[in-house]
Image (tube, rainbow, N blue to C red):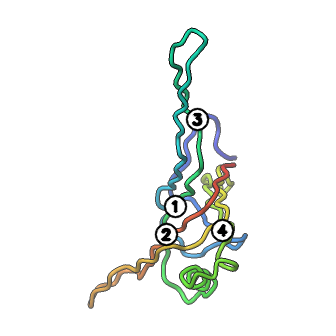
Amino acid sequence: MGLTNGDSAAAHNFALQIDGVQVEYLAEVGALQLEQDVIKHVQNNPQGKPIVRMMPGISQGGTVSVTRGQTQSSSFTNWINESLAGNMGSARKNATIIYMDYMNNPIKRYDLRNAWCCKVETAGTKAGEAQVLTEQVTITFEELVIA
């Protein structure tokens, strides 16, 4: 049994897929950001009074950051390297952020079209500490489709 009307999803059950392949050891998905220009259109009505209309302009694309545990998995690392090397023919991929209910049923999908890695940041390390080594990757995308 999934969520019923009025239930909210728990924030801890999510996944990231890149070209249909799920990224393993995902620890965090940051806030998804997308911006669209706003065009201010001013005209006069037949009586000469100004009318102001706000219209959607060009989408600026968006970004999202993901944090994952460092592993020996090469597919995600290869994608990062292709992006950072500027090989856009192979770096641009479709990615999907999936939020699930407590029964692992998908309840919301954010499809990121033509996504690629634009920033990588590794966690700091300190001798004697026993924390997981992570990397935070900022993904930029050209189009967002919410399903």
Q: Which residue is mark 4?
A: 17
Q: In terms of secondary structure, where does tag 2 sit?
A: strand
Label whose residue precedes the other's in the sequence (1 or 2): 1
Q: Amino acid at mark 1?
A: Thr
Residues at discs 1 and 2 in contact (Cβ within 8 Å): yes
Label whose residue precedes the other's in the sequence (2 or 4): 4
Q: In terms of secondary structure, where does tag 1 sit?
A: strand
Q: Amino acid at mark 3?
A: Met
Whole-percent x, y for residue 35 in the image: 52, 50
Query: Disc 2 to disc 4, how far (Cα)?
Result: 15 Å
Find the residue positioned furthest to the top: 47
Q: Amino acid at mark 2?
A: Thr
Query: Disc 1 to disc 2, how far (Cα)?
Result: 7 Å
Front residue (pair 83, 2): 83
Q: In terms of secondary structure, where does tag 4 sit?
A: strand
4 or 3: mark nearer the eye? 3
Q: Quadrant of residue 97?
A: bottom right
Q: Which residue is mark 1?
A: 63
Q: Amino acid at mark 4?
A: Gln
Q: Which residue is mark 2?
A: 138
Query: Disc 4 to disc 1, how far (Cα)?
Result: 15 Å
Q: Which residue is mark 3?
A: 55
Label whose residue precedes the other's in the sequence (4 or 1): 4
Find the residue positioned furthest to the right: 20
